[in-house]
Structures are given as structure tokens and as C-alpha cells.
Amino acid sequence: MKTLIVNADDFGLNDAATEGIAEAFLGGSVTSTTMMVNAPAVSKAADFAIRHPALGVGLHFNLTWGRPLSPAQSVPALIAPDGCFLSRGQLAKRLLLGRIPPHQIRRELDAQIRAFVSLGLDPTHIDSHQHVHAFKSIFSAVAARCKEMDIPIRVPWVSDTLTGGVGRSVRRYVLKMLLQRSVAPWRGKVAWNSGIGSVFDIHYGGEALTDDHYRQILAPVQCRNFELMVHPVTSAQAMNGFTTIGDVSEAEWRYLRRNNLKILANELGFTLGSYRDISL
């Protein structure tokens, strides 16, 4: 039996994301989520998680939205002049130029882990906002902490079987090249998922999401532990200024608040689980 982890990113980002994820969990589709501890609705997210311990909750390590939890003077390479994190493009440029000291990444990661634990939760795993831990220095920092805490790390693997537009294909190629360097030193040292996919990996035109869309993602999967990455939100409009995928995310919420996905997963030979079910 293959394990399907339906993981919702951005728990705590705002009310629309937090409520969308909560409703998708209560509907029986979402099994796991990752929480942004420097975001406005983190207290609401933590309260829900404490009341619903069956929901696996990991840390959504964030270096590209909002402000750091570390003192600004201790992580100057990670922030813009306004004190907020750099954009993903700016962060990537500094990383590629070697202008971000690894100790600053570790300092902010540790601050976010402490904030997570202070909410009364223990993370089931760690991933990152916008997959920035594909970069080797960030991956190494996260993997080291996962090893110490004996929890898995999400690897945003790139599948050759999935489709998408030209822009998506280029981004996936870059991601694949980054991961080849980042993952190699950690094989056999830390647990991780063996595959990942999302609605962005298929030809999706903005229509209402159905079983057929998710069948396209899941039917080809043969690996043991597969993550279906989702971003359900109750309102696309509420995501203005937070994300550029609000319309897709609202469509995901409309589908995931029912239990269709669980039925489909079982039909395709999956059992639903969380990162608690992954080990070396």
C-alpha cells in the first residue's frame, strides 16, 4: 500500500488560508499541513492544531514573506532595507553569489523552530515556503535540524511524468538541478518523501477541480510515500498581497472540503497518512 500525504502549505498565513486548510482537514481530504510562524493567523492555526491532534503539522520555514523572527541585525543578509525578507528572486541571487552566510540561515531557522514549539506543538516535518530549501545551504541547515529532531524533511522532487506549461517546465528543470546537489549529502541520514505533485503539474485551465484532475496527478505514482501539495483558501480575493495563486487555491478548497479525494486515493491504491508515517 502506498501512502498519500495531502499536505496543505501556508497554515497561519491569514484567515482565508487557515480556515481553508481547517475545513479541508475536517472534510477528510487534508492530512498534513505546514505552519508559517511569522504570519498573522498563526495563533488561530495553532489553536486548531491543538484541538485536532490527528492533523500532522510541520514547520513551513519561511525566508521570503514578512519579517524574520530573529533580530534584524543578526540576519542582515536575509532582509531588504525595509526589514522584510527578500523576494525569492533576490534571495536566490544572493545565495548564488555566496552572499548569505550559512549561520544566518541557521539562526532564523532556529528562531522559527522555537516559535513553533512555544505554541505547544512539535513539528512532524519541515519544508519551506516557495521551496527555497532546494538551495544547498538552506537544505543543509534544514536537514541537519530534521536529523537532530528525528523528523522528516519534505523534498520537492521533480517528476518526469508530470506535465505543465513551458514556464513551469523551466522552473522544474532548475529545481531538479538544485536538488541534485542538495540532497546527495543527506541520503540515508534523514527521512523524506519519495515523491511530490500538485495541480500545477497538470494542464489546468482554471475550471472547477474534479476527481479527474487529481487522478492525472496520482494515477502514475508508484513511489512509497507521495505528497500531494495543496494550498486551499476560502477566498481568492483575501489572498491579494499574500500570494499569486489565489484563484487556484480557492478552487482547491472547493474540491478538498469534501471527501472525494480520500475515495479516489483508496481506489488508486493509496492510504492517507502524514509525515508521521515516514521513517528511514
Image (cartoon, rainbow, N blue to C red):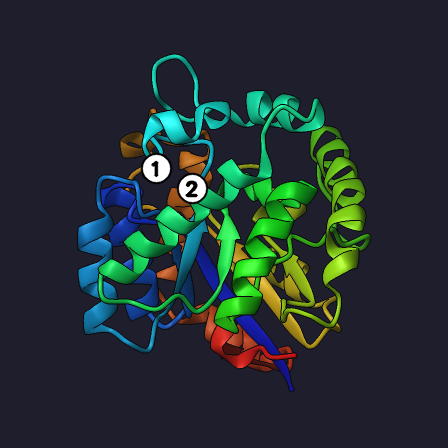
Residue 21: x and y, percent?
33, 56
Above or below, comparing residue 270 to residue 159 in the picture: below
Q: Earlier in the sequence, mark 1 or mark 2?
A: 1
Q: Secondary structure at mark 1?
A: loop
Residue sitting at the far bottom: 1
Residue 147: x and y, percent?
57, 67
Q: Quadrant of residue 192?
A: bottom right
Q: Amino acid at mark 1?
A: Ser
Q: Do callouts 1 and 2 mark residues in contact (Cβ within 8 Å)? A: yes
Q: Quadrant of the C terminus?
A: bottom right
Q: Quadrant of the N terminus?
A: bottom right
Above or below, comparing residue 28 to residue 87 in the picture: below
Residue 200: x and y, percent?
60, 44
**Can residue 152 be seen at all in this image of the molecule?**
no
Q: Quadrant of residue 197?
A: bottom right
User: How far apart in space, not on screen, are marks 1 and 2 (Cα)?
Assistant: 6 Å
Of the numbered discs in the image, which one, if any, rests on residue 108? Answer: 2
